[in-house]
Image: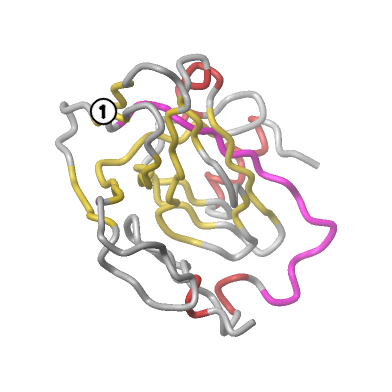
Amino acid sequence: MILPDHEIRKFIKEGKIVVKPIDEDIQIQPAWVDLRLGNEFRIFKIASTPYIDTKQKTDNYTEKITIKDEDPFIIHPGEFVLGTIKEYIKMPNDLMGVVDGRSSLGRVGVVVHATSASINPGWEGIFVLEITNIGKMPVALYPGQRVAKLAFHMLSSPAEKAYGERADVKYNKQQGADETKVYTEKD
């Protein structure tokens, strides 16, 4: 079951769902919450390394940048970046979230959220978007602009072991656009 607007408002008021800061009149839609672009981005540098090795910690292939609220972030054709949202999100153990891009940006070639669009029950933090410009023109994105939507799906029962309770968590309570931690996986 996907939560409708009135249940989203109720759960936010009760503190069961946390989405802060939020302008409920603008961001709460009929079946989701619009998420706004944050100020922090992680861009990929041109490097002499021939490839990214997912079994090794590498911290030299991206650069974190922060822009002012009034400044645009220009994403060029073919470019892939990580970008934060403005809101801090906290999910209860009986809901999962699904993040999707907004069609208004898709119509100019910007794909907002390439993979891993799920937010686990029990997760909290600043969600990081995977943003790509598949169009033919550079596109200006602005901090505070609504760029994605978050729908809440009710589980049939609470998760037995929520994301934040697991020993193998990598991104719980993240505060910014961190590089991948795939190298920490044991499998």
Residue density around tag 1, few if under 14, some if 14–19, many if 20 or more, within 10 Å: few
Q: Is residue 114 above or below residue 181?
A: above
Q: Residue furthest right?
A: 156
> Label 1 is placed on what type of residue?
Ile
The magenta span reads 144-161
Residue 81 pos. (x, y %): 36, 43
Please state the horizontal and vertical placement of residue 167, each as a whole percent of the image: 57, 84
Q: Secondary structure at mark 1?
A: strand
Q: Is residue 25 visible?
A: no
For residue 118, side relative to residue 107 (left or right): right
Q: Which residue is mark 1?
A: 74
The picture quadrant where one finds residue 29 is: top right
- Which residue lies at the image location 41% right of the left edge and 17% below the top edge? 136
Q: Is residue 157 magenta?
A: yes
Residue at (36% x, 62% y) in the render: 50
As drawn, is 65 to the left or to the right of 182? left
Residue 159 magenta-highlighted: yes
The quadrant in which residue 135 appears is top left
Name the residue rendered at 55%, 63% in the picture. 123
- Residue 75's x, y, as percent? 32, 30
Q: In this picture, is 44 found above or below 107?
A: below
The relative height of residue 15 versus residue 9 in the rendered view (above or below) is below
Given residues 37 and 82, the one toward you in this image is 82
